Image (tube, rainbow, N blue to C red):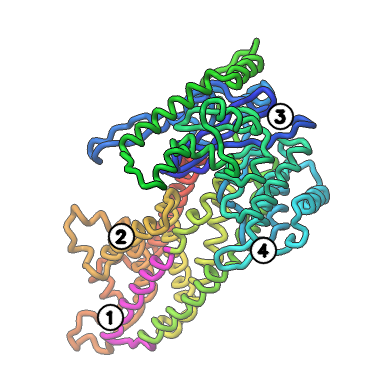
Amino acid sequence: MTDRANHISVAMTEDVTSTNGTPRTKVITSSTMVELNKLQPRGSTVSFHSIQYKVKLKTGPLCKRKNTAREILKGPTGSARKDPSGLSGEVLIDGAPQPPNFKCLSGYVVQDDVVMGTLTVRENLRFSAALRLPRSVPQKEKDTRVNDLITELGLTKVADAKVGTQMIRGISGGERKRTNIGMELIIDPSVLFLDEPTTGLDASTANSVLLLLKRMANQGRTIIMSIHQPRYSIYRLFDSLTLLVSGKQVYHGPAQNALDYFADIGYACEAHNNPADFFLDVINGDSTATAMNKIQGEDIDFEELSGSRQTIEERLVEEYRNCSNFRDTQVELERITQGKQYTTKPTSRTITYNSSFFTQLHWVLGRTFRNLALNPQTSVAQLGITIFLALIVGAIFFGVKDNQSGIQNRIGALFFITTNQCFSTLSAAELFITERKLFVHEYISGYYRVSVYFLSKILSDIITLRTIPAIVFSCVVYFMIGFKTTPAAFFIFMFTVTLVAYTATAMTMAISADQSVVAMANIFMTISFVFMMIFSGLLVNLPSIMNWLAWLKYLSIPRYGLTALEINEFVGLKFCEDPAVGTTMCTGEQYLDYLGIEYTTWGLWENHVALAIMTLIFLVIAYLKLRFIKKFT
């Protein structure tokens, strides 16, 4: 369910009296799974048939990498929301193949809460209702559905409180988990999957969450979950239990019969021992006798212990395959598929939407802007830093003169301005990384299209964090330094600075779109900007560069920005009264000739065109990366 490199995914199968079937993710190679399923009325039956899941691993040195396949799931088990390329088998819903958009029709609560923390509980639920309920449902009915759900989940007192982030104090862990459950219950799914819903909750809160799920199961939903060592009061709520070790099933049947089954095969649970803890001890080879030996200080051969664990695993698998529960399960699975043909290859998956493109854009864009407004560390702080830097630069180059020193000061100021615009966009690296889990979950669940999310993030970032700071920075710096005092020159300056910020932001997005760690994205961006800064035209005379390196200047964002600013500033300036003095840099045009810059009108605007083209190219790359990442499918 969760997608982490050191985790594996295991799942449940179908039993005669109850529904089963969802994946389990654990750090260890054995796991416990449980299911809450209503008895009356009966919900949907989810059955898994001949499911196998393999992952491709890269081994060997970098120059001789080999792809090897590792089998994670064996036999009649299943996996959900994984890369389908390694999945084979069939998952049936009430005996029929699941529809291609089953992920959009079923509810799925991930282990790590994915909900916008800057919004209130009600706002998050309204967002889910607006995008996931059919467009034929009036907004008034959607609001009614949200209010009823808030009451059903016991969230009335905190309905208008912010969920909370690391910077904003919000609701409690249990209320947050119930909000995540509510986001899925908006569409009233017949099947609800949960991945360790008690993670991060104390015992009392976890118990209240499971009681809520039990009530919903009794009201007509099939609820399937994985859970880690629940306490006994929670364990008693389960109708069906599945235990797996190394991807193989060692028990599946009624939860209340599990202790008797293990006692029959030689593993008796001591009095007052939590059954869930006991099951994990058994499947991990930590029997009571072994534990007592450890307490008594007897020497243990760990290699022998590892071998005994393997033996225990094999015995548990063999015992289960010879028991009546296994035979009954096989009979029921055969009954479900009797007279029907199904494929062992995974069916194609599609994402369907209940709202139009513009409806999605309205809600996602509104949420994104609101999130930025309620995150002062990203919006207000950036504007404050921009003003501070503008004042510092303006003070250093204050009142630049029209003399020989004025040439150097102007070039230094323009170089710093373009370079600062590039490095200030490093914050855009977090744009897709911090919300990656939220985006993946909402996209797969059919909230919105990738293009809607991408466009919303681009518009919100460019308007609030790039355009406004660039305009403020230009207004402060331009007049403090004392550049050319003509309206046209000022607006061209401001336009160029803003366009450099756009291009650098687009490049940052293109590099970071498929990254999962902000630090790595920042490293790539810093290296790129350093090389671009070298070829910007100040640190080295570009006409003197060797031909086999000269082409790199065409990839430099600061070069285009600095060249445009130099043309805008230097054309028409005079730095000495009498050319007979002997200086070679008496006019701005002479200095531009020395740099090899074409200072015609087209020479100015071709740099703007180049920046615009680079911006579009980088945005397309960022979108394609976001669209075709495997984990999103």
The residue that label 2 is drawn on is: 527
**What whole-number distance in Å separates the C-alpha atoms at marks 4 and 2?**
39 Å
Identified at 79% across, 48% down, the residue is 145
Provide the residue span drawn in magenta: 398-426
Tell me if mark 3 has few (under 14), some (14-19) or many (20+) residues whose alpha carbon lies within 10 angstroms of its own: many
Identified at 68% across, 44% down, the residue is 184
Does 547 sit left or right of 301 as displayed? left
Vertical side of 501 occupied by 124: above or below? above
Pinpoint residue 614: horizontal percent, then vertical percent.
41, 54
Q: Closer to the observer: label 4 or label 1?
A: 4
**What whole-number distance in Å separates the C-alpha atoms at marks 3 and 1?**
76 Å
The amino acid beneath tag 4 is Lys
Tell me if mark 4 has few (under 14), some (14-19) or many (20+) residues whose alpha carbon lies within 10 angstroms of its own: many
Q: Say if residue 208 shows up in the picture.
A: yes
Instruction: Please tell me which of labels 4 and 2 falls first in the chain.
Output: 4
Indicate the secondary structure of the residue bearing disc 1.
Answer: helix
Instruction: Please tell me which of labels 3 and 2 falls first in the chain.
Output: 3
Does 296 sit left or right of 362 as displayed? left
The amino acid beneath tag 3 is Ser
Pinpoint residue 406: horizontal percent, then vertical percent.
30, 84
Vertical side of 444 occupied by 619: above or below? below
Query: What numbered label is drawn on residue 162?
Result: 4
The residue that label 1 is drawn on is: 408
